[in-house]
Image: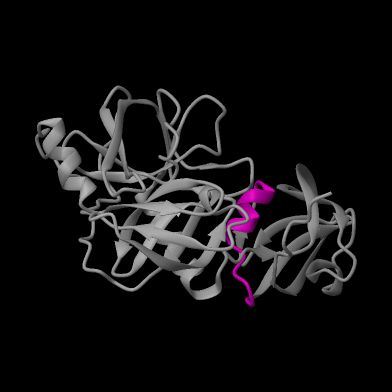
């Protein structure tokens, strides 16, 4: 539910939100994080890049060893766990209203345990989007500037002390981006359970097209290539087929199709092949990890 809480003096808002902020230290760099649940910290995946070990910096400056539970490059989210020390949880509202021009701040901790904060404004707000790494983000909240060193993964809140999400430096060269609460809620459980975000996979490349099926014009996705031994190929899908619907629901884009693919599910694809209607049953697999080079 959206809150209409009045702004606080900024120092009070920082102190309130900062009670749930921790620091993170690896051999290569330092970052910030927020206590998401008892003994669980959410941070930026960039902070943990190639980290062999990580320590959580508590409000009193104590550093405790933590375990990396999972990283999702697509949303730049990472989760680490440590022995609970009673650090309070931040109050959060996935539906909090955000407007361009709102005063916001990011808060983290120095390796000494001292709070550090930076202040700015919301520079842009929009609906759901996908990062250049393919991650789905529930809404765009872009800051009007970059992040100071050590604030990757920091708590971002508004002047009323409402948690808006986590600060990420990974999606824009000049601006920090806030990974919103709704995205964190969706991704954290998968990282804790699987160590990654599992994405459905048919093993196809496709593009939107208008086609004929039994003499009727329909919108769909023209299959332009198939992965060898991928789920689509095993089910009998062919290059040149037009996918018209999945489970009876029309599809207008490949991204839209992927949104409805659950790993392990059996789905029915309505296709047009040579102008005739066909239905194929496909077992959705998990998308293989991306390879570099």
Nearest the eye: 125 or 155: 155
Task: Look at the picture and state if 149 lies above or below 261.
Answer: above
Provide residue 40's location: percent of width, then percent of height.
Answer: 36, 66
Report the side of 285 relative to 188 (left or right).
right
Residue at x-position 72% and y-position 62%: 289
Nearest the eye: 268 or 273: 268
Instruction: Determine which quarter of the picture holds residue 171.
Output: top right
Q: Can residue 157 be seen at all in this image of the molecule?
A: yes
- Span shown in magenta: 252-265
Report the side of 268 relative to 273 (left or right).
left
Provide residue 206's location: percent of width, then percent of height.
Answer: 78, 49
Residue at x-position 76% and y-position 70%: 279
Nearest the eye: 258 or 35: 35
Instruction: Determine which quarter of the picture holds residue 230.
Output: bottom right
Task: Look at the picture and state if 159 lies above or below 287.
Answer: above
Task: Please say whether residue 260 is one of the residues in the magenta stretch.
Answer: yes
Report the side of 238 relative to 108 (left or right).
right
């Amino acid at each position: 539910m959206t809150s209409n809480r009045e702004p606080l003096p900024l120092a009070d808002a920082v102190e309130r939100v900062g009670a749930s902020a921790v620091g993170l230290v690896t051999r290569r760099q330092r970052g910030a994080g927020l206590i998401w649940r008892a003994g669980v910290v959410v941070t930026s995946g960039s902070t943990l890049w190639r980290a062999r070990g990580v320590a959580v910096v508590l409000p009193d400056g104590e550093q405790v060893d933590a375990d990396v539970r999972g990283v999702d490059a697509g949303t730049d989210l990472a989760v680490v766990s440590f022995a609970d020390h009673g650090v309070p949880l931040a109050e959060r509202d996935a539906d909090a209203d955000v407007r361009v021009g709102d005063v916001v701040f990011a808060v983290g901790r120095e390796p000494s345990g001292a709070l550090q904060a930076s202040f700015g404004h919301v520079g842009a707000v929009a609906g759901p989007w996908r990062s250049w790494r393919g991650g789905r983000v529930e809404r765009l909240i872009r800051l009007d500037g970059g992040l100071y060193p050590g604030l990757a993964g920091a708590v971002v809140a508004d002047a009323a002390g409402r948690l808006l999400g986590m600060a990420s430096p990974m999606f824009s060269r000049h601006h920090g981006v806030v990974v919103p609460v709704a995205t964190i809620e969706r991704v954290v459980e998968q990282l804790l359970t699987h160590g990654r975000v599992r994405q459905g996979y048919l093993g196809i490349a496709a593009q939107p097209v208008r086609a004929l099926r039994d003499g009727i014009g329909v919108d769909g996705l023209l299959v332009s290539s198939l992965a060898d031994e991928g789920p689509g190929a095993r089910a009998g899908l062919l290059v040149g087929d037009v996918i018209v619907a999945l489970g009876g629901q029309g599809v207008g884009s490949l991204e839209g199709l992927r949104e409805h693919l659950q790993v392990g599910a059996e789905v029915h694809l309505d296709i047009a092949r040579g102008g005739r209607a066909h239905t194929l049953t496909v077992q959705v697999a998990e998308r293989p990890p991306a390879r570099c080079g």
